[in-house]
Amino acid sequence: MGASLNPVNSSIIATALVAIAAALHLPVGDTAILISCLYLTSALAQPAAGRLAEEFGPRRVFIAGIVLVFTAGIVGSLAHSLAALIVARVLIGAGTSAGYPAAMLLIRRRAEQAGHEAPPRGVLGGLSITGAATVAVGPALGGLLVAWAGWRSAFWINIPVAALTLILVLTGIARDPDPVRPGSPRALASRIDLLGMLGFGGSLAALMIFLSALPHLDRPALVAALVLAAALVGWELRAAHPFLDVRLLVSNGALTRTYLRNGLTLMGTYVILYGLTQWLQVARGLSAYQAGLALMPMGVLTAVTARVVSRRTGVRLPLIACAVLLLVGAVAVLFIGSGTPMAAVICVSAVFGLTSGAGTVANQTVLYQEAPAATLGTASGLLRTFGYLGAIASAAITGTAFHSSVNDSGLHLIAWVLVVISALVLVLTVLDRRLAEADRRHAKSPRTGGARNPTQCTATATTESTESTERRSADMTTGTHTTATIDPARTALLLMDFQPVTLGAVPDSEGVLARAGEALAWARAHGTQVVFVRVALAAADAAAVPAHNKTFSQVAAAGYLTDGTAATAVHESLAIRDHDLTVRKIRVGAFASDTDLRAELRARNVDTLVLAGISTSGVVLTTLRQAADEDYRLFVLADATADPDPEVHQVLMEKVFPRQAEIVATADLVALSRAEEPTARH
């Protein structure tokens, strides 16, 4: 329900625009600002909400958004001017934007609790169905409400829906496990990249002003949009925690193409949604309710198509079908006129229902596959942001086509624009080889399929966990068979505590060190980021260790881990190069260091970690737990890791680590990365 609030508010307003214009004595074209302001707000707020959900917890952000929607419903219901309605729509955009990215994070959390590497396709499909169907059903629902209770109903409907959603969240979703630690205002602003958010919002606002002025060319607004966009890119390339991860968009072509494909597809869908609705009311003389009812088949087919696509294991064929149908529908609109039978008009609109259902589900699935796990909230928000950019453009197209009057020629102008859009989507999809590769990779995954009830999920997860543990128990020296693959370009090899002070405490230290060298050679050959982690205490660090810290108090007092000594340096056989990342840690885990390791990995678009180190029960165990909570994909090199107690090493490798990581041997790295090499080069 929370994730559907934004789509339903996007579409329900369509049938109310004519009534609002009449009530406020405005031209119909002026009410397009009610569409654009929601999309402008949502375009900024969606990824911002995703970032805040990653920072403060998805449930907290989800609830805050619902409260804003409830408030917006009250403001809109009492409004008597266009300005007040704009305020209500901005509040709706901000509040509803929390729903989707927070929902994606909550789904990921639930999937992990159920023992899944990824949610069952039916779960993601259900979220897509809700969003896609409400977009198309919105006009029919809006038409019914406007005809029954007036245009204000398009706003007050949010009050009961938000109230019910809030009750369901408070009673049905567990609290966020981590406490809120905002830190100083400056640190918080850096973590959420406040300046990046403001720059992004400013560039979008200037772009919206330029588009709203069309067909008049507002050059100052265009220049402002370009200048702010350039400044934003420059800032984000230097930001420690970029709001708009430019490096990720450049390096992860599959994700960027998904954003573009989704934005263009929704642009085409919204052009028809808004343009055809206004044309039916003005040119054909239908009431708001009749216009909404005429688009009901579009909504039904959206839901049905989304359901069918969500049950498929592949995404390339649905996306190609989506592009072809979009082109077919665009050409069909060229032959629609005031004298066209309503049955034909309804059939043409239904084609766009097929497009909306297939495109929304497939693009969301590709996003989940391609986005880094640690930034899924922000990535999910950006998917919606690109959709809203398409919607803003669609509002500008509709406003331009119907600038003087709503007639057949304006509708045909919209159709020609739609032909161009659909052709771009088709080319972008057909030429995307990554989609076929993703289908092959997903087909090999052992955890696919439709939705299952919680009992089935738990039973299956238990069985799979047991089988996985049994396979790993077979041979902990050479690792275990795994169907996972490693993309070297998005992976970091963490070589941890390979220092004289630690090597002397484990058996076969020379063998472990030699295999660490083999892993390092693999990383060098495949362009994988190398991170050397060492434990060492400066004088201030040693003085700050409290007496009750059993691990560090004694060694700190004795000076065993003093920084700058040969004992705490990385072993000379593991040569450090300039582009390697060296981290000095002051506690057990690799993330407790003098370097913001999270920010460094994020800046390098790393979502997979390969761990090796000494000892298994120390740095490897702690780092694995921390990295798992950060949603990284994890691999542990069983033969490049050692512990002073071999039995402890065995138990951790067989019983504990497999729950959160793949246990492999150094020799497996070449085979695991071979399947991803063409993708990385592409």
Image: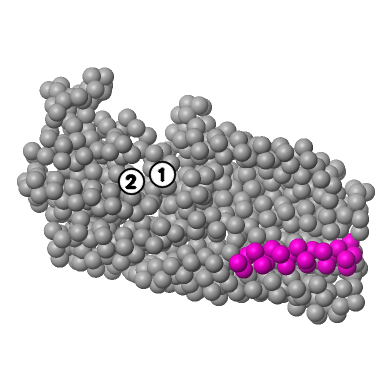
| Residue 544 visible in rendering | yes
Mark 1 secondary-structure assignment: loop
Quadrant that contains the C terminus: bottom left
Is 299 or 110 nearer to us in this picture?
Answer: 299
| Residue drawn at (60%, 57%) of the image | 260
| On screen, residue 464 above or below 477 | below
Magenta region:
406-427
The numbered disc on residue 529 is 2
Secondary structure mostly taken by the magenta-highlighted segment of the chain: helix
In contact (CB < 8 Å): disc 1 and disc 2 = yes
Q: In the shown orientation, is residue 566 left or right of residue 662?
A: left
Mark 2 secondary-structure assignment: strand
Q: Earlier in the sequence, mark 1 or mark 2?
A: 2
Q: In the shown orientation, is residue 600 left or right of residue 352?
A: left
Q: Which residue is mark 1?
A: 604
Within the image, what quadrant is residue 338 found in?
A: bottom right
Q: Which amino acid type is marked by label 2?
A: Gln
Whole-percent x, y for residue 558 in the image: 12, 23
| On screen, residue 354 above or below 64 | below
Whole-percent x, y for residue 168 in the image: 55, 55
Q: In the shown orientation, is residue 639 left or right of residue 243?
A: left
Q: In the shown orientation, is residue 430 left or right of residue 204?
A: left
Whole-percent x, y for residue 406 in the image: 89, 61
The 10 Å Cα crowd at callout 1, few under 14, some 14 to 19, many 20 or more, is some
Q: Which amino acid type is marked by label 1?
A: Arg
